[in-house]
Amino acid sequence: MSWGRNMKIAILVSLFPPKWLAGTEIATYNTAKHLAKRGHEVHVITSLDEGLPKESMEEGFHVHRIRRRKVRYLGVISFWLKTPLVLRTIEPDIVHSQDIIMGMPGLVAKTFFSKKFVVCGRGTDVNNPGLFMKPLSRLVLGNADAVIALTEDMRKKMQRNCNRDISVIPNGLNLEKFENLSRDETQSKNEKLIIFVGRFRPEKGVKYLIEAMNIIIQHVQPVKLILVGEGPEEEKLKQLVGQFNLGRFINFVGQIPNEKVPQYMVTAYVFVLPSLCEGFPNVLLEAMGSGLPIVATNVCGLPEIIRDGENGFLVEPKNPGQIAENVSLLLEDDELREKISKNNKEKARKYSWDSVVDRLEEVYLRHL
């Protein structure tokens, strides 16, 4: 759907592909691409990674990369100060900040250049705010022209800081990536594959999945866990695998391009997300699009995506026993796994990027 007016839209995001491939970065890339497809002039403003140009065109939208200092707080502040100067040259109709921290340059643009700005809470900025986030959130959310949350859970948390109307718009899914892929568990050479895709960070809870594997192998054979990704906990996780003597049951494959994720998923039997905290993980939508049953933790907004027994199972965080019990059930019960697989493929259609961008355009135009 097109809303009859082409806009000039600036999207502010701290990090961006190709180097950074976490949920916010992938969602921002797809948002920009699908808005540009509709005829909008889209400018993504992000930080400069080594080896990349300061300005480029990607899939119909502009990318402006700003060099920032690699010092924790000074780097963010320098980005805040430089971004409005780029916005001044672009002269957008609306500024879209892809988390509350990136809302500060949006607020500067509104205050000094009379620009409308929208801010979207993405995850950590809402679920695990740091020391300075509470006053910053009140300032940004209170002055934004529109506020977006990814889930109802995030909306309620944001309203505790600023009691105002907040739209709930989830992340989207590129359905076309999954249309020509068929579930083929035989590709796994008779090993029942379990898969995790994400960053190796403490909040992702991967260590509890590894501990669960120590239980799963006692009930299901042959079985293997595929860990896709990288991050600061990688060495610690590999040590844990060695400690449990699970080397032949767990395979670290490193980070892969996002477009190849479905090819890994369609060979697996179950996707597991053992996170301690989440926003709206794109990888859950990719698992659903691949027809994978999901075992995920009952945290934050995940129960809004995973209906227990319908398209997966919810377990309590930090509970390897519950993870093992539900994964084992799905690995052993072919009929249940097939039923959940069909449910997930159907549910994934609700998250098409077209429907997400329809709702974004509606928010933009309501405030112009």
Image: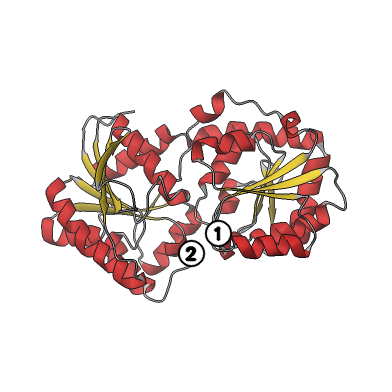
Q: Secondary structure at mark 2?
A: helix
Residue pictured at 77% horizontal, 43% vertical: 330
Residue 186, image x and y in percent? 75, 29
Q: How many marks?
A: 2
- Disc on the earlier residue, 1 or 2: 2
Residue pictured at 15% horizontal, 62% vertical: 111
Q: Is residue 158 left or right of residue 192?
A: left
Give the residue pinned by disc 1: 300
Q: Is residue 124 left or right of residue 38?
A: right
Residue pictured at 46% horizontal, 61% vertical: 156
Residue 153, image x and y in percent? 50, 57
Give the residue pinned by disc 2: 127
User: Between residues 251 and 97, which one lies in front from this camera angle?
Assistant: 251
* Tag 1: amino acid: Cys
Residue pictured at 22% horizontal, 47% vertical: 94
For the N terminus, the quadrant is top left
Mark 1 packing: few (<14 Cα in 10 Å), some, or many (20+)? many
For the C terminus, the quadrant is top left
* Tag 2: amino acid: Asn
Q: Secondary structure at mark 1?
A: loop
Residue 56, image x and y in percent? 26, 40
Q: Are marks 1 and 2 in contact (CB under 8 Å)?
A: yes
User: Between residues 120 and 156, which one lies in front from this camera angle?
Assistant: 120
